[in-house]
Image (cartoon, coloured by chain):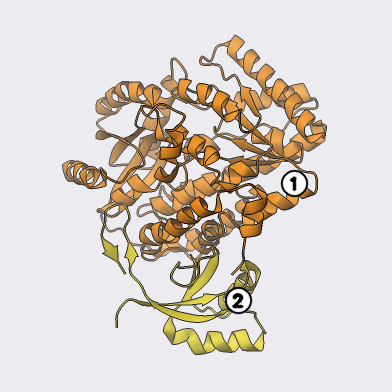
Chain colours: A yellow, B orange
Amino acid sequence: MDNIKHYILFPSYNTGLALEGFLKKEKIKYTIVPTPRELSTCCGISIQYNKADEERISEIVKVNSIDIIGFYSLQKEYKDLYLGQNKE
Amino acid sequence: MADYRELWTSLNMDLEKHDQLCEVLPELYGGVYLTQENRPEGMNYFNFVVSEVHGLRIAELDKHRKEGGKVLGTFCVFVPDEVILAANAISVGLCGGSQFWVPDGEKVLPRNMCPLIKAAVGAKISGTCPYFQSCDMLVGETTCDGKKKAWEILNEYVPVHVMDLPQMKRTKDYAMWMDEIKIFIEKVEELTGNKITVDNLKKAIEVCNAKRRALKRLYNFRKITPSPISGLDALLISQISFYDDPVRFTEKVNELCDELEERAKEMKAEGKKRIMITGTPMALPNWKLHHIIENLPAEVVVEETCTGTRYFENEVDAEGETIEALIKNMADRYLNINCACFTPNDGRVEDVLRYAEEYKVDGVIYYNLSFCHTYSVEYKKVEEALKKAGIPIMNIETDYSTEDSGQIKTRVEAFLEMI
């Protein structure tokens, strides 16, 4: 299955930023993104990550007791709302 | 997930309608921004700000107001933020950049009016913009007839103070603008209950200058070929600069610039055409033209607009021992902005020619929001000067709708092939 994207959702932006600090320190690639509507109707941040790093991130979350809602995977293509094409 | 619904309810927002807006944003942002390749890591902060655009910053404004502080909404780069900050108030830019608000604006405004005004008014009357809802006062100005008359309508919803901006730059116009700044100071003091002193005004000038310096530093990286940051990302940062906390924003832009310094050493030119945009502002979330251009083999390297160079060029001199001296310094800096509302406005043509050289542009795209007459008329002067200098230029007049995106793409494609 292509176009699977991986996200971590948080109860508040604070815990998201806390995890970001650790990811930065550990040099793990991540992107802060608006939470996809498919995963939650509340606005706010999520962290998109590479599947290969999931175990390491999971460990960081556990060791540092970071409060997260969970890890989610989603088949997702971004729509180009201006030009009407879909993109990965 | 943080739930801001209680906060939005307390701001008298139309939650149901606002939810439609919330639904579009992640998709729009994803399609335009997150599909860009190899973005600087420092853009994560700006991703964060966009993701929390109606959340965290609104909560900060709410906290400020609960502690007795005031929030002022502005619409123009001529309104001196220094005065607002000096009175311990917060300034937020309110220009609307989304088609979402246009139909509501058209309920009270004529349709043949610029989309920026229609969207701003629509955002207020539909109760779907938490920034508008957080404002204790709006600060209007007289940069165009449309805005001038729209203040009267907005004043029915929230108090509006209008600054009378002169339309010429003679000595008496400087005197008039200094007087306007003085009246504005009195108004802000009255609203906030805080006295503006030489000391707090100087501190505010420093904060605003530091922000200008950071934006200037960012833009300087775009003079490099290839630019280590996309035009889209630079535009987003400019847009965010109007409502983010100025000290935090400055710090984050400088962090990003440190990263760009390293990136610039490693990037290799891909032969993309270097484009300057000149013309009317692009308010959040208007990313249409940059998105179209940068999906072609081209990069936008500078915007001679109010959401570009006009916002950060030149600093306010912080030297002076009286309020009057500082007011003069502010007037000097602000009246140095070259907006098409002035006659004559030769300074703008000079700016465009200078930037064309500094940013090594291959071509200029004149961006005109529909029905913005001053910029539309001024095209002729800019076109003549650029043609004389041998720099290709094209004119695009458009609004916030997406119907003409394909057509604009075709025209830009042809322009890029020509240059």
Residue A79 placed where, x, y %?
Answer: 32, 62
State left or right for residue B35 relative to residue A44: left
Q: Quadrant of the C terminus of chain B?
A: top left
- In the foreground, B245 or A10: A10
Q: Which element type, helix, strand or loop, lies under badge 2? A: helix
Report the amino acid beneath label 1: Arg
Report the disc number at residue A19: 2
Q: Residue at 82% across / 34% down in the picture? A: B193
Report the amino acid beneath label 2: Leu
- In the foreground, B167 or B214: B167
**Compared with residue B352, is residue B69 higher up or lower down, i.e. above or below?**
below
Work out whether residue B327 can be spotted: yes
| Chain to which mark 1 belongs | B
Which residue was labeled with disc 1? B65
Q: Quadrant of the N terminus of chain B?
A: bottom right
State left or right for residue B8 relative to residue B287: right
Q: Which element type, helix, strand or loop, lies under badge 1? A: helix
Q: Residue at 17% across / 45% down in the picture? A: B417
Residue B269 placed where, x, y %?
Answer: 30, 58
Residue B131 image-quadrant placement:
top right
Residue B162 placed where, x, y %?
Answer: 62, 23
Distance in Å between CA atoms under marks 1 and 2 = 30 Å
| Chain to which mark 2 belongs | A
Q: Residue at 42% across / 20% down in the picture? A: B346
Can you name the residue that lies furthest to the top here?
B172
Mark nearest the camera among 1 and 2 is 1
State left or right for residue A56 relative to residue B281: right
Residue B206 image-quadrant placement:
top right
